[in-house]
Amino acid sequence: MPDVHVKNVSFTYAGSSHAVLRSVNLTIPEGEFVLLAGPSGCGKSTLALALAGLIPSRIAGSFKGRISLGDKPISTMEVHEAAQHIGIVFQSPEEQLVHLDVESEVAFGPENLALSHDEIESRVRTALAYTHMEPLRKLEIFALSGGQKQRVAIAATLAMQSRVLVLDEPTSDLDPVGTQEVLNVLRTLNKRYGWTIILIEHKIDEVIPWVDRVLLMDQGKVVVDAPPHQAFAAMELWERPGVAIPQMVHLARQLPDIFPDVLPLSVDEAHAALRGTRYAQALQREAAQFSPEPASLLASSSASSILSWEQVGLAYGEKTILSDINLTVQPREWLALVGSNGAGKTSLASLAMGFQAPTLGAIQYEGKPVIPGQISRQSQHMAYLFQAADKMLFTPTVEKELLFGAQSQRKRKDITPTSYSVEHLLEIVDLLAYRHTNPFHLSYGQRKRLAIGALLARYPRVLILDEPTTGQDEKHARAFLQFLQQLRERERLTYLMITHNMQAVAEYATRMVVLHDTRIVMDGPPEQVFAHSAELEQYGILSPPIAQLHARLCEQQAQRVALNLPTLLQTFQSIEAHP
């Protein structure tokens, strides 16, 4: 398969005066594994669409330059022709899943190539094996979790056997271990079969150990093009647009005596350098001072709860989703619900809103039963921010979006007029300047804030947040989480957050609950739960890199671990000051 050539490519969407791509020049050799990083809006996804031949053939705008596969111009190919050479996986699997069941979806592309039945079956079987979806082969798409749908989208692209793969945030809906599994698949295709992989990702920490080359885009241009260990030499190029830098790179900058030359990119590399040093010895001494904790890390509280699940079970036919769930949420907690894809996280949360009825047990809000189907009753006290927040917006202006929710609450006796005033809500979500703007003219983060504003108009005490940072770069995700933190403190809210973003759990959650195999297996403060990094990996969870490193340097004996670099450095300094 020839090299990919991008020569002086610029693109401006129809109706816009702003160029999204500006004179991009690249050559991607056959068999290279490339990470394409950058802030939201920098042009990454637009470049991906152009590489796949969808720009300019299917997406209107002003296109200049040339993209070619060897000497074949991609931009003049028909889409079905380009797809045989370059496959694309979109960030949202909903955008490319068209069939009712898994098997039919994966077979759809090969069938359109008029391949033999045996060849189609071979491709389907291989693609499902790569993505660990064989057991769900006959399942209907609607019954899958978001992460499972993402795996199906990847499998469908793999079945086409296009030897150049462009993947636009293919792991955004995957649990941490699932992310590593997909990266391992891509690496296998890359190294064993020579496929060219172009991967767009915000998960820099997870992805960086796997790639051969790093491209950083900003404002439509490539500003960094280097091998991974050299890509962060000029950290200001990453920090200025707010793109994540691996935690181990930050660590190395603070410990130049340990890392004088090469920057570590992974926990393995940092651990190898720190093992046996005074830092590791100090952490081990500290860990030895603590008495062993109980074998089970399961919290129990007699305090009055705002929300509770009591011996709850949920099953769809013969398939068990939840078993013996006993969980209480205390007022003003920020509880993170984590676990592998399909573990039942969204099902557990949806029971609290009454979206469905439990098979066994009961759910209560402030001691009163949650009644399945009476969603309007639950919504007087609880609100659910769906992962696809855009689907919650439907009015022509920001103001009307907020008014709709506020008007439905005017008859409530427990709130005052100021509680649901549009001005107050606009101030809370920082959208005063946009009150007459169409919601879909806002940025992604602003639309998320507007969706929360519409929920707050109902004056809830509990917010259920389903993957609130999915699809956002480091800068925007952090800004949104800080907004949620300030909102929680100011409005005295309680959060139940479903997430695969372990760094968000580490920095913001007051408590984390781990679901695995239909049950709650761990429950406690993040600094304690993340100390069990080896056990968590069995549940589809990878601790944040700093927490992993702390646990490994303590030979898995630490009872609590640092969750961020400043805390780890303070631990080093404290131990050295008082050896």
Image: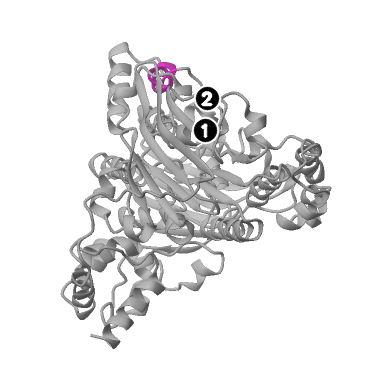
> Is the residue marked by circle 1 packed among few (<14), some (14-19), or many (20+) residues within 10 Å?
some
Residue at 48% x, 28% y is 81
For the C terminus, give its image quadrant: bottom left
- Residue numbers of the magenta segment: 101-112
Residue tagged 2: 356
Q: Where is residue 182 in the image (x, y as percent from the top left)?
A: 33, 41
For the N terminus, give its image quadrant: top left
Of residues 407 and 150, the one drawn nearer to the viewer in this rendering: 407
Mark 1 residue element: helix
> Is the residue marked by circle 2 packed among few (<14), some (14-19), or many (20+) residues within 10 Å?
some
Do the CB atoms of the residues marked 2 and 1 lie less than 8 Å apart? yes
Q: Would you say residue 103 sits in the magenta stretch?
A: yes
Residue at 34% x, 23% y is 136
Q: Would you say residue 430 sits in the magenta stretch?
A: no
Q: Where is residue 490 in the image (x, y as percent from the top left)?
A: 65, 60
Does the magenta stretch mainly form a helix, a strand or a loop? Answer: helix
Amino acid type, mark 2: Gln
Of residues 150 and 285, the one drawn nearer to the viewer in this rendering: 285
Q: Position of residue 75 (x, y in %)?
A: 55, 38
Task: Give the alpha-carbon distance from disc 2 to disc 1, as whole Å.
Answer: 7 Å
Residue tagged 1: 350
Give residue 531's mark: none
Amino acid type, mark 1: Ser
Outermost residue on the left side: it is 276
Which colour assignment does the render follow? one colour
